[in-house]
Amino acid sequence: MKKKIVSAILCTAMAVTMMAGCGNNTSTNAAADKGAAAEDGAAADTAAEETPAADESADASSDEGSVLNIYCWNEEFKSRITDHYPDYTEVDATTGTIGDVTVKWNITPNDDNAYQNNLDATLLKQADAAADDKIDIFLVEADYALKYVDTEYTMAVSDLGITDDDLANQYQYTKDIVTDSNGVLKGVSWQGCPGVMFYSREAAKEILGTDDPAEVQTYVDTWDKFNQTAALAYAAGYQMTSSVNDTYRVYSNNVTSKWVEDGKINIDDNIMQWVEDSKELVDAGETGTHELWSDDWSKGFYPEGKVFCYFGPAWLVNFSMAADTEGSIGNQGGWGATEGPQGFFWGGTWICAAAGTDNASLVKDIMLQMTTNEDIMKEIVVDDDDFVNNKPVMEAMAEDTSYSSQILGGQNPLGIYCAGVENLDLSNLSAYDQGCNEEFQNAMKNYFEGSTDLDGALDLFYKAVVEKYPELTY
């Protein structure tokens, strides 16, 4: 592929794939990252004409660099490296060392799509950058991973010398997310983010007469039962969920078709089932329509909020549901975890090697140490309450009676996470997922709140998506 064509590919990806910053921050800070569509597509197209792609000859022999530049959107990966990577020494908030290599952290928050905009602009200059200024590692999230892995700005991990055997213990879905359209793996992750249903133990005892996870599961193991239990919760003075958006990812992770088929917008039956179920719950007063991360959505983190359950992975309950705030349900060890109606995932962070890196050997070692070293994997589980991307480690920890979650009242939830992650099927991911998912939820809010009928909401959705992606039809 010619260099200018490769550059144009990334620019096209900037214009037509998910440009909004992911609203599902997986960091320990777990702030509400609310992205907006990028407005600099024209500038990016201009850059494509002026800037050649990263040197395609860059490979694992280019490992003499004295500076390792890492691009990310928050402190999560930096904290993992600082706490767990051998021989890393912190110099200051944005600088460290590994041996005689200086590590520079370029951290740009997701807000208003700033991280992706910064990354895009810098990748377009990668070939002409001085050696010490080249990006070596950058991080991506699931919602926009394909935007980057489907270009030659990311190196195949095999070109770094990482083999299938090295990654054999990682969960397959974490590989699927960063596999390009030619079947080439372009990144790795240290974490898995299988989701479960977190429920208020006190509410469960009041509504169901038990807070035992296995018993609670019998009331929510299908959507029909979940919706029936919502009526019980309402009768007891609770909403089943804080918002219809709490269940959206569970439905959207279990579709049987892609958002776009042959250039035409496609709404999967499971997405429409979410609409039907959610409308009934809203009309019955059994859930709300709050935006995720809003103050109203967060009220259920406290007993007086009267919310029965939330859906999410480990990072949600550990870092995003006010567990460190006195009086919250989490702070009192008042949440329980069970599988819920369907398995799903939410979030995650992937490490990608930038084509043109002059630190390939070090990048390879970071990837292997942070995603395959079982001692480090176990440290991350124990020290950071993370679910790691290593099946044997997680299965062993699920059986470890010494491990438990204080937030979950002493429960060891890892077996539930492990069960959920095995059922994930990401064969229907597409480059349009983030934009379509966001616009669909935005449009349906109008329907749920009664400002338009279903046809009107669907029309709003189609028009918003076509405005964002003019190449699509409906």
Image (cartoon, rainbow, N blue to C red):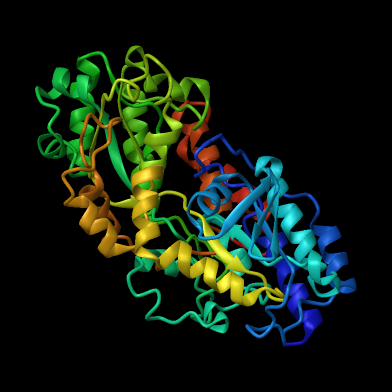
Q: Quadrant of residue 409?
A: top left
Q: Position of residue 43 (x, y in %)?
A: 86, 59
Q: Position of residue 217 (x, y in %)?
A: 15, 39
Answer with left or right where residue 301 lies relative to residue 140.
Answer: left
Camera-side residue: 168 or 204? 168
Q: Position of residue 416 (x, y in %)?
A: 22, 48
**What is the count of numbered marks?**
0
Camera-side residue: 370 or 332? 370
Q: Quadrant of residue 298?
A: top left
Q: Is residue 468 above or below residue 363?
A: above
Answer with left or right where residue 116 lies relative to residue 423.
Answer: right
Tell me which residue sits at (29%, 34%) in the image: 198
Camera-side residue: 198 or 163? 163
Residue 293 is at least partly visible in this image: yes
Q: Is residue 362 above or below residue 443?
A: below
Which residue is most to the right? 50
Q: Which quadrant: the N terminus? A: bottom right
Camera-side residue: 386 or 340? 386
Q: Position of residue 207 (x, y in %)?
A: 16, 20
Tell me which residue sits at (40%, 68%) in the image: 427
Q: Quadrant of residue 354?
A: bottom right
Tell me which residue sits at (69%, 52%) in the image: 105
Residue 251 is at least partly visible in this image: no
Q: Which quadrant: the C terminus? A: bottom right
Q: Is residue 75 above or below residue 349?
A: above
Answer with left or right where residue 29 lies relative to residue 394.
Answer: right
